[in-house]
Image (cartoon, rainbow, N blue to C red):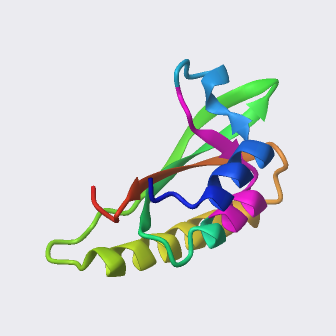
Amino acid sequence: MLIPSEYLEFIKTHGLPMSSINPGSNEFALIPSDALQAISLLSGSYVAICGGDVLEKQGQLEYIFENWYCDQETGENPLAYVARSHKESVTFINKIAERNNPLLYVVLVYSELGVI
């Protein structure tokens, strides 16, 4: 497995398990600042962030149908895709963080080896 252990430990200790609303899910919802920290833990890895979802916690987590995605471009080197996917994710999450809404959470969708 190419997912850095620091990343996995971080999302498990700082995130809310998505299995509470998606049985069987192994994803975690993070507040925006923690999502940014999680992305920094992927720096130097071969893990691309394919996108993510924004949720709101009103008692339980709920999808608010806001998301982003980052597809690999035709002919794009996998390492270039990984770097671009991190940058685009940080840009999107920073916009969420600027709202200063403590009820918003982010779920990162990632792919090992920068391959979709």
Residue 37 on image: x %, y %: 72, 66
Which residue appears farthest toward the top when viewing the image? Answer: 23
- Residue 87 versus residue 13 in the image, above or below: below
**On screen, residue 112 above or below 89:** above
Q: Residue at x 55, y 22 (%)?
A: 22
Direction left: furthest residue: 75
For the image shown, how many numbered marks are present on the structure?
0
- When the figure is inspected, residue 88 is found, relative to residue 104, above or below; the finding is below
Q: Residue at x 42, y 69 (%)?
A: 46
Q: x and y percent of residue 51 in the render?
A: 45, 55
- Left or right: where does residue 87 sit relative to residue 98? left
Nearest to the observer: residue 64 or residue 45 = 45
Depicted 26 relative to depicted 29: above or below: above
Q: Which residue does the image show at 48% across and 72% down from the upper left?
A: 45
What is the x, y in percent for residue 87? 51, 77
Q: Decide whether residue 30 is among the magenta residues.
A: yes
Residue 12 relative to residue 45: left or right:
right
Is residue 95 in view from this perspective? no
Residue 98 is a magenta residue: no
- Residues in magenta, as a range: 25-38
**Residue 26 visible in rendering:** yes
**Residue 104 locus on image (x, y percent):** 74, 46
Quarter residue 63 falls in? top right
Quarter of the image for the C terminus: give it: bottom left
Could you say which is closer to the camera, residue 67 or residue 87? Answer: 87
Residue 3 appears left or right of 57: left
Q: Is residue 50 left or right of residue 32?
A: left
